[in-house]
Amino acid sequence: MKKAHKKKYTAHEICKIFDVTKKTLFTWEKEGKISKVKKDWRGWRVFNDENVAEIKRIIEEKMRKNQ
């Protein structure tokens, strides 16, 4: 059985997609809102589809609170 290929995203790509700063992104990770963020050989964060779903939930929750 083949594993499904998961897309990988850099912090820069995530920031562009969701219009958030790296500081915000890294704060969410530090607070435990984004789980299991891997790092590449340089120590740079590499986000996957699961992380993207978590970020979407965070943003949607913030939008609901602000309504």
Image: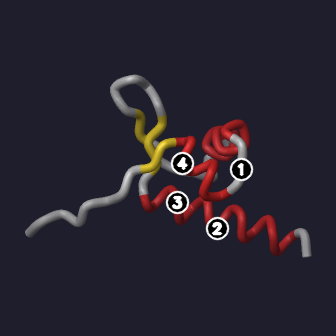
Q: Are circles 2 and 1 on residues that touch, CB within 8 Å?
A: no
The percent position of residue 3, horizontal first and vertical second, equals 18, 63
Quarter of the image where the N terminus is located: bottom left
Give the residue pinned by disc 1: 20
Tell me if 37 is positioned left or right of 65 in this view. Answer: left
First-in-chain label (4 vs 2): 4
Q: Residue at x 53, y 65 (%)?
A: 53
First-in-chain label (2 vs 1): 1
Give the residue pinned by disc 3: 52
Q: Is residue 64 above or below residue 29?
A: below
Residue 13 bears which disc, if any?
A: 4
What amino acid type is highlighted by mark number 2? Arg
In this view, the mark in front (4 or 2): 4
First-in-chain label (4 vs 3): 4
Q: Secondary structure at mark 4?
A: helix
First-in-chain label (1 vs 4): 4
What amino acid type is highlighted by mark number 3? Val
What amino acid type is highlighted by mark number 4? Glu
Give the residue pinned by disc 2: 57
In this view, the mark in front (2 or 1): 1
Q: Are circles 4 and 2 on residues that touch, CB within 8 Å?
A: no
Q: Residue at x 54, y 48 (%)?
A: 13
The percent position of residue 45, horizontal first and vertical second, equals 48, 36
Q: Residue at x 90, y 69 (%)?
A: 66
Tell me if 2 is positioned left or right of 32 in this view. Answer: left
Mark pair 2, 3: CA separation: 9 Å
* 42 or 54, nearer to the observer: 42
Quarter of the image where the C terminus is located: bottom right
Q: Secondary structure at mark 2?
A: helix
* 30 or 59, nearer to the observer: 59
